[in-house]
């Protein structure tokens, strides 16, 4: 009897040790096999005790029952641990969009940031009105030229704050369907600096994804968002970058993307003014290829456009012209943390895609036909990490237009450029505190010019 009790005590100790180490075992593929072998040994012992029922004391029977119960609890604990670890692995694989909740077969995730800016700005060629969007971020085409220099004007704003909501629905049959809606408060009316600063929300992005297809409004396929450098300004290297969001239909297969995007022709009239004809009938066509690797990424994009104007705008003959362009961009890793970003774009009839429409797509000849305007632009940027939580970006960009001055007059922009540098400190990962200095210049075809100096301090919390 004493001998059997010793064996039963050993079995209980073994079961108890498994219970305490189940989370570690759950990481091994053979945990269930080990439990099966141990359970078999206990069952054999119980069967022997059952055959010797008359000789077994009540204490021995109780020990046997406890051993079996301990094994059952151990198996349940291991199963729960495996489920938790699987859930954690799935969340890690999902990346930053693992926040959110499920409603039926739809997973809803959210994100965005809250950003507060203090901007002090001075312009050499005239005063920028207090309600102008040119005081919220750099718009090269609105840098004043030919006027009296202003002092440093300071504004506080939280308008860049944004929020997005994403969904992904399991529809079965291997299909993936999702949506993305994103809002912010830039370039909208409704607020004032006197009392409320209550600016109206606007739609930044709103699209549906289905397998390899995208339908809706997002960044133009001609633009490489991943090449934009870190800037406290809303965009940063504005004169030298492609920048456009619009409705489209896009197909993606690996690194290849093909898109049909919203057409819109902007025309420079004989007086130098801008006319938005609204006569377009063929989508802008974009083909793009992205190559990614350990080095970073490289992107090549080509665009073809049909620029069109109708007689109802100018009272002349109908005409259309071809616009086209090529953009090369990328991000190259330097060392363990630093990176170098760049973009170079050239073509004709690209006006509204470059630098927030610095110049227009085409000018109108005397006979009513269109003369596409050639443009050249680009930027470079280097980001250096001084420490894990302190970094700086230095960037410069340039834009040049080949305007047909006979048609556009000398009052249109000939070139624009800017440089900026910043330092950003992140006391904790989601929070960025930074300061940035920017200098930008705009020059017209007639030689007149103006510059802008800006100091910006920002706090941004990403969630």
Image: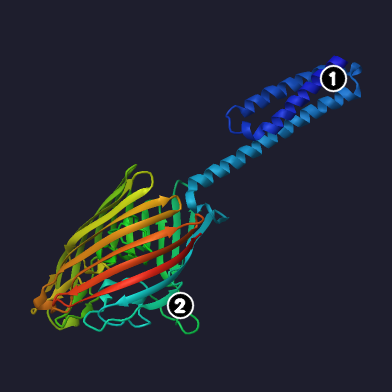
Task: Determine crowd level at label 1: few under 14, some 14-19, many 20+ residues with C-alpha closer than 10 A.
Answer: some
Q: CA distance from mark 1 to mark 2?
A: 79 Å
Q: Which residue is mark 2?
A: 199
**What colouring style does the render use?**
rainbow
Up-down relation of residue 346 to residue 57 (above or below): below
Residue 196 shown left or right of residue 446 in the figure: right
Asked if residue 67 lies left or right of residue 331, the reply is: right
What percent of the width, then of the height, locates residue 213?
36, 54
At x 78%, y 19%, the residue is: 45
Q: Quadrant of residue 359?
A: bottom left
Q: Is residue 98 above or below residue 313?
A: above
Q: Position of residue 381 (x, y in %)?
A: 30, 56
Q: Depth check: 389 or 320 in front?
A: 389
How far from the left and from the top, in percent, is residue 453? 31, 72
Quadrant location of the N terminus? top right
Residue at the spot of label 1: 5
- Within-10-Å neighbours for mark 2: few <14, some 14–19, many 20+: some
Which of the 4 image quadrants contains residue 405? Answer: bottom left
Q: Residue at x 81, y 23 (%)?
A: 9
Number of callouts: 2
Query: Which element carries disc 1, helix, strand or loop?
Result: helix
Q: Is residue 416 something that shows in the picture?
A: yes
Q: Earlier in the sequence, mark 1 or mark 2?
A: 1
* Residue 170 visible (yes or no): no
Q: Tell me the residue at 84%/26% (across/down).
A: 63
- Tag 1 and tag 2, C-beta contact below 8 Å: no
Residue 5 or residue 294, whichever sits in front? 294
**Numbered mark located on residue 364 in the image:** none
Q: x and y percent of residue 124 in the render? A: 26, 78
Mark 2: secondary structure: loop
Residue 376 against residue 74 in the figure, above or below? below
């Amino acid at each position: 009897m004493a001998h059997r009790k010793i064996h039963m005590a050993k079995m209980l100790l073994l079961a108890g040790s498994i219970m305490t180490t189940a989370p570690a075992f759950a990481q091994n593929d053979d945990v269930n096999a080990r439990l099966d072998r141990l359970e078999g040994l206990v069952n054999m012992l119980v069967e022997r005790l059952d055959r010797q029922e008359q000789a077994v004391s009540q204490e021995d029977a109780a020990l046997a029952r406890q051993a079996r119960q301990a094994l059952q609890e151990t198996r349940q604990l291991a199963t729960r641990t495996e489920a938790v670890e699987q859930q954690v692995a799935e969340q890690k694989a999902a990346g930053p969009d693992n926040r959110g909740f499920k409603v039926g077969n739809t997973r809803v995730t959210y994100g965005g940031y809250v950003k507060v800016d203090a901007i002090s700005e001075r312009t050499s060629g005239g005063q920028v009105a207090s309600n102008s969007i040119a005081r919220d971020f750099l718009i090269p085409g609105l840098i004043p030229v030919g006027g009296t220099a202003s002092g440093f004007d300071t504004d506080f704003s939280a308008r860049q704050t944004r929020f997005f909501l994403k969904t992904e629905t399991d529809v079965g049959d291997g299909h993936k369907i999702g949506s993305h809606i994103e809002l912010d408060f830039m370039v909208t009316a409704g607020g004032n600096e006197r009392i409320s600063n209550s600016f109206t929300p606007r739609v930044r992005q709103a699209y549906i994804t289905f397998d390899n297809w995208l339908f809706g409004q997002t960044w133009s396929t001609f633009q490489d968002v991943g090449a934009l450098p870190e800037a406290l300004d809303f965009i940063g290297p504005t004169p030298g970058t492609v920048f456009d969001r619009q409705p489209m239909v896009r197909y993606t297969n690996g690194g290849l993307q093909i898109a049909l995007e919203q057409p819109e022709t902007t025309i420079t009239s004989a007086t130098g003014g801008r006319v938005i004809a609204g006569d377009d009938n063929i989508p802008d066509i974009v083909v793009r290829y992205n190559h990614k690797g350990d080095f970073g990424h490289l992107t090549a994009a080509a665009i073809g456009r049909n620029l069109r104007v109708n007689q109802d705008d100018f009272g002349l003959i109908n005409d259309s012209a071809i616009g086209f362009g090529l953009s090369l961009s990328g991000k190259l890793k330097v060392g363990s943390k630093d990176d170098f970003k760049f973009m170079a774009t050239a073509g004709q009839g690209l006006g509204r895609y470059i630098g927030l429409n610095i110049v227009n797509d085409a000018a109108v000849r005397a006979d009513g036909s269109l003369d596409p305007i050639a443009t050249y632009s680009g930027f470079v940027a280097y980001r250096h990490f001084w420490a894990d939580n302190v970094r700086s970006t230095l960037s410069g960009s340039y834009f040049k237009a080949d305007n047909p001055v006979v048609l556009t007059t000398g009052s249109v922009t000939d070139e624009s450029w800017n440089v900026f540098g910043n330092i950003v400190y992140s006391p904790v990962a989601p929070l960025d505190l930074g300061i940035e200095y920017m200098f930008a210049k705009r020059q017209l075809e007639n030689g007149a010019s103006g510059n802008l100096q800006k100091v910006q301090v920002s706090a941004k919390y990403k969630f």
